[in-house]
Image (spheres, rainbow, N blue to C red):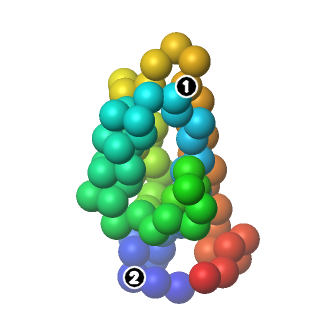
Amino acid sequence: MSRLAQKGVWVVFILVTYDIRDEKVRRRVRALLRRYSFAMLAYSVYIGRGNQGIAERLAAKISKLLGPSDRAALVLLQDFQYEL
């Protein structure tokens, strides 16, 4: 168990996927995910490490960027559910 897990801060993988029409918005979302050190798995799928708080902040920031027809999803995975 990591030191963070011992303190009650669970480190998880955060999977982010999106379907965004506007290229400018896509670039902003990609830049945001890169600032959080997320790695691209596919064109619109990213994964990174974090916790519930980071996932909530990302969800709030991404939702502010999205247009009415855009979609994004964040999925939290425990380390035993995903292996690099």
Decide which of 78, 27 is in the foreground and name it.
27
Query: Which residue lies under the disc numbered 2?
Result: 3
Residue 52 x %, y %: 47, 51
Residue 35, quarter of picture: bottom left
The label nearer to you, 1 versus 2, is: 1
- Looking at the image, residue 57 lies above or below residue 38: above
SS for callout 1: loop
- State yes or no: discs 1 and 2 in contact (Cβ < 8 Å): no
Tell me the kind of residue under disc 2: Arg
Residue 20 x %, y %: 52, 33
Q: CA distance from mark 1 to mark 2?
A: 38 Å
Tell me the kind of residue under disc 1: Asp
Is residue 65 toward the left or the right of residue 77 in the image? left
Mark 1 or mark 2: name the one nearer the start of the chain: 2
Residue 13 x %, y %: 55, 65
Is residue 21 toward the left or the right of residue 77 in the image? left
Residue 22, quarter of picture: top left
Res 27 seen here:
yes
Instruction: Say few, some or many: other residues with alpha carbon within 10 Å of mark 2 (under 14 / 14 to 19 / 20 or more).
Output: few
Query: Which residue lies under the disc numbered 1?
Result: 70
